[in-house]
Image: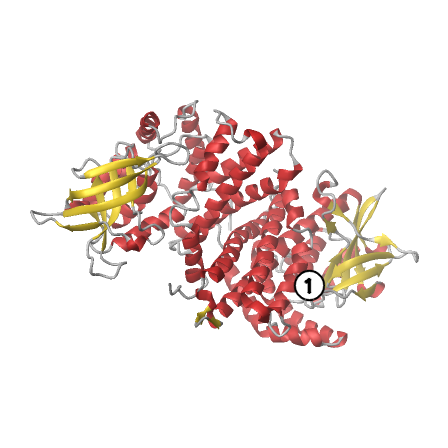
């Protein structure tokens, strides 16, 4: 056991810190769920990509630096420390890319990964449907073989697609065999959002911005080259993506340790009110515990072990820690918490609203608790 | 960055698990519970001998001083196993506190004699006279105080000492308003040990009456204060590991029961209400564990953050074990409320230990004071 980073990893940290200090915009960018903000964030992704900082853990041929998971964690720590912009490309680079690297063909990787890394093509996720949320295997959007040639014809409706209002591409699962058992007969598709028959209806979120969208598919033609993994294997491919979403790639611990550090600053600025001390201490500890747990998991991964159902513990913990950190901050702000302002109070309010989605997306925390109970504790599956 | 245990560490822990499965099953706790004091002492000595044969008590003592020369990362898994078994003997006090502290105080004569008893006579060592808590915010660093008081007969009286009944010596601290802390290693023969009735039969609590003597002195003043702080940090970290083991055991007992117990024609573990209780306990345990391992590493490598790290481990492990106890009882239902069910041995040890050496609330404040 050695909880220090190697000299090489620390050198990588110094390099990342220097680059970020020189390049992170001094003023926060407008929200990426607005048209201007989306463009500004896309531009930032390109700036990262130009110096090979957008996807450090990817193979160099796709725009990365081919560094290990520990270096990736170091980069994330520096990224959040620098208060760099949110990643508008996160659905692609953090969720789809790990799945594509595992299941994609060489042609798919060469076609899709570089523009994903540069921000030229932003991806949204087409999973949930109006009648299939927690019960994801209940999706009804379907794909049938194209009677006039190769490929598939997609129809149906997806919803709650984050970045769906502005994205160029969508990854989604569709039912290709209506007669198969419901976890089988699903296939994972990559769909251009400008394909004929795709209609996007943005949905204003709780903060008024169009962070997600409904997507309608009306006989959308998709070539065979845009099937990820095997036809009929969509569920297992999707679960690889879900593992990334719940596990450590979507939510690196730096996000929480950085927020907890700001919370402690706020606690001191506000005169260390005793009524908040318990919540502030707990927020600090939970963020640090998540960081330590991630180092633990990353060590396992780097030793060649797989991340198992512990990923569901992760998702519960980071999402609820995020809410708790921001809730503690709003308590410290007291009657100022409701003010829509630029600067510190407004940031905490934005962060709070953002955090509230965490226990819902990527499989609600109730579903995660079922997974923990069934797969970590061996309890019987519910009969319902 | 390598946050994992070595193969040797894993094997040592497995060896301790095997020994405790054989020597400290719940049947042994029950036998211990109903036994007269002499019988208890005999049972304890036999069990301790097996642990001593593995080298556990002197694991942290340098090889030059006759120990194994290993460190806290080697030891933390053993404490976890002791918690899993609700081991009644003072392993935390002897192996986690007395052994390393006495090693740093060599060649003080009192330290030499006590350490020799620990290593060669397979004696247990108790520790008392340090409270963590009280007025944490703004009070003495570390929130430490001594409950030791001077009696009318001139002896010192130290309440709530763990493991004193069968110990060969007791590390005892006291505090004087003028001269500060003193730490002594007092042979059991010089002490009067009054057993204190307490809830958990797997924890042996006593009030110890002892004479203040230069012969037993290990450290005083500023030096003693530093040693007392180290004992408190070590106690927090070791107790955290023990609590992790207790939590794991209680969650396992409850999950096993939920798979067996049928209601409405199905195992109660198939109901989401039961699943989610257990999942909550499991998640809390999952994240208390790396915090506990980190505290062990910080002790082993003398990090400047050791007090922070030990307090964080104790806060998280206390909360995790307290939640595991409540959840396990609820999942068991009425049977869990009986003497017949094994659960109470682990719950009672948890309730006592989660509040010993500072409870979760105290350690949260100690953490906050250090960030």
Total marks in image = 1
In the image, B141 versus B211, the foreground residue is B141
Indicate the position of residue B282 as horizontal and vertical percent values. Answer: 50, 57
Q: B351 left or right of B165?
A: left
Above or below residue B363? Residue A374 is: below
Question: Quick one: label 1, few (<14), some, or many (20+) residues within 10 Å?
Answer: many
Above or below residue A228? Residue A269 is: above
Of the 4 image quadrants, the one containing the C terminus of chain A is: bottom left
Which residue reaches farthest right?
Answer: B153
Q: Residue at x 16, y 37 (%)?
A: A196
Which residue reaches farthest left?
Answer: A148
Q: Which residue is mark 1?
A: B90
Q: Chain of mark 1?
A: B
Q: B175 left or right of B335?
A: right
Q: Residue at x 92, y 58 (%)?
A: B153
In the image, A84 versus A53, the foreground residue is A84
Q: A216 left or right of A281?
A: left
- Callout 1: helix, strand or loop? loop
Indicate the position of residue A293 as horizontal and vertical percent values. Answer: 48, 49
**Quadrant housing residue B84:** bottom right
User: Can see residue A277?
Assistant: yes
Indicate the position of residue A60 as horizontal and vertical percent values. Answer: 29, 38
Indicate the position of residue B48 as horizontal and vertical percent values. Answer: 66, 69
Colouring scheme applied when the structure was drawn: secondary structure
User: Can see residue A66?
Assistant: no
């Amino acid at each position: 056991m050695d909880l220090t980073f190697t000299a090489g990893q620390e050198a990588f940290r110094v390099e990342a810190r220097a680059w970020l200090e020189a390049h992170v915009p001094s003023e926060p960018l407008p929200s990426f769920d607005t048209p201007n903000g989306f463009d500004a964030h896309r531009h930032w992704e390109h700036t990262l990509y130009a110096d090979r900082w957008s996807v450090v853990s990817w193979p160099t041929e796709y725009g990365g630096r081919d560094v290990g998971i520990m270096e990736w964690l170091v980069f994330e720590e520096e990224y959040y420390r620098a208060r760099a912009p949110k990643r508008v490309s996160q659905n692609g680079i953090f969720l789809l890319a790990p799945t594509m690297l595992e299941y994609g063909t060489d042609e798919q990787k060469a076609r899709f990964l570089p523009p994903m890394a540069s921000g030229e093509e932003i991806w949204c996720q087409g999973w949930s449907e109006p009648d299939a949320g927690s019960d994801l295997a209940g999706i009804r959007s379907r794909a049938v073989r194209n009677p006039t040639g190769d490929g598939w014809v997609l129809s149906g409706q997806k919803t709650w697609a984050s970045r769906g209002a502005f994205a160029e591409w969508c990854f989604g699962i569709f039912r290709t065999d209506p007669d198969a058992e419901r976890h089988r007969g699903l296939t994972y598709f990559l769909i251009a959002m400008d394909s004929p028959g795709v209609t996007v209806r943005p949905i204003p979120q709780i903060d008024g911005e169009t962070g997600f969208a409904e997507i309608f598919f009306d006989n959308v033609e998709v070539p065979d080259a845009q099937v990820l993994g095997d036809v009929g294997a969509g569920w297992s491919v999707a679960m690889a993506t879900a593992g990334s979403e719940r596990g450590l790639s979507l939510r690196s611990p730096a996000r929480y340790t950085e927020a907890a550090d700001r919370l402690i600053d706020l606690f001191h600025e506000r005169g260390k009110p005793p009524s908040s001390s318990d919540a502030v201490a707990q927020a600090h500890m939970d963020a640090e515990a998540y960081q330590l747990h991630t180092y633990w998991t990353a060590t396992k991964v780097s030793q060649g072990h797989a991340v198992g159902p512990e990923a569901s513990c992760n998702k519960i913990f980071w999402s609820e820690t995020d809410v708790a950190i921001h809730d503690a901050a709003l308590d410290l702000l007291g009657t100022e918490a409701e003010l829509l302002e630029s600067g510190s109070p407004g940031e905490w309010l934005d962060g709070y609203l953002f955090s509230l989605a965490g226990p819902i997306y990527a499989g609600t925390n109730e579903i995660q608790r079922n997974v923990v109970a069934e797969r970590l504790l061996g309890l019987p599956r519910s009969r319902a | 960055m390598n946050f994992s245990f070595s193969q040797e560490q894993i094997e040592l822990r497995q060896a301790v698990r095997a020994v405790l499965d054989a020597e400290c099953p719940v049947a042994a706790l029950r036998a211990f519970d109903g036994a007269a004091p002499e019988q208890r002492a005999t049972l304890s000595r036999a069990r301790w001998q097996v642990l001593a044969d593995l080298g556990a008590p002197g694991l942290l003592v340098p090889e030059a001083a006759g120990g194994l020369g290993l460190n806290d990362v080697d030891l933390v898994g053993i404490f976890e196993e002791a918690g899993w078994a609700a081991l009644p003997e003072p392993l935390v006090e002897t192996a986690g506190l007395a052994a390393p502290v006495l090693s740093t105080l060599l060649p003080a004569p009192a330290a030499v004699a006590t350490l020799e008893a620990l290593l060669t006579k397979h004696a247990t060592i108790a520790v008392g006279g340090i409270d963590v808590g009280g007025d944490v915010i703004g009070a003495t660093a570390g929130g430490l105080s001594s409950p030791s008081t001077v009696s009318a007969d001139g002896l010192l009286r130290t309440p709530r000492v763990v493991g004193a009944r069968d110990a060969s010596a007791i590390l005892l601290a006291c505090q004087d308003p003028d001269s500060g802390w003193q730490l002594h290693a007092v042979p059991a023969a010089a002490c009067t040990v009054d057993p204190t009735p307490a809830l958990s039969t797997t924890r042996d609590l006593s009030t110890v009456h002892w004479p203040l003597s230069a012969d037993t002195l290990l450290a005083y003043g500023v030096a003693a204060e530093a040693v007392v702080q180290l004992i408190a940090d070590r106690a927090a970290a070791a107790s955290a590991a023990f609590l992790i083991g207790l939590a794991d055991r209680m969650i396992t007992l409850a999950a096993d029961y939920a798979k067996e117990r049928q209601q409405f024609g199905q195992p109660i573990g198939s109901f989401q209400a039961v699943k989610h209780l257990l999942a909550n306990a499991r998640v809390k345990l999952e994240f208390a564990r790396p915090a506990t391992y980190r505290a062990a590493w910080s002790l082993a490598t003398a990090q400047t953050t050791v007090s922070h790290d030990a307090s964080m481990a104790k806060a998280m492990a206390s909360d995790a074990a307290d939640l595991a106890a409540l959840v396990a009882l609820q999942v068991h239902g009425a049977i869990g409320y009986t003497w017949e069910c094994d659960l109470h041995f682990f719950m009672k040890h948890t309730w006592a230990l989660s509040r010993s050496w500072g409870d979760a609330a105290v350690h949260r404040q100690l953490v906050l004071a250090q960030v």
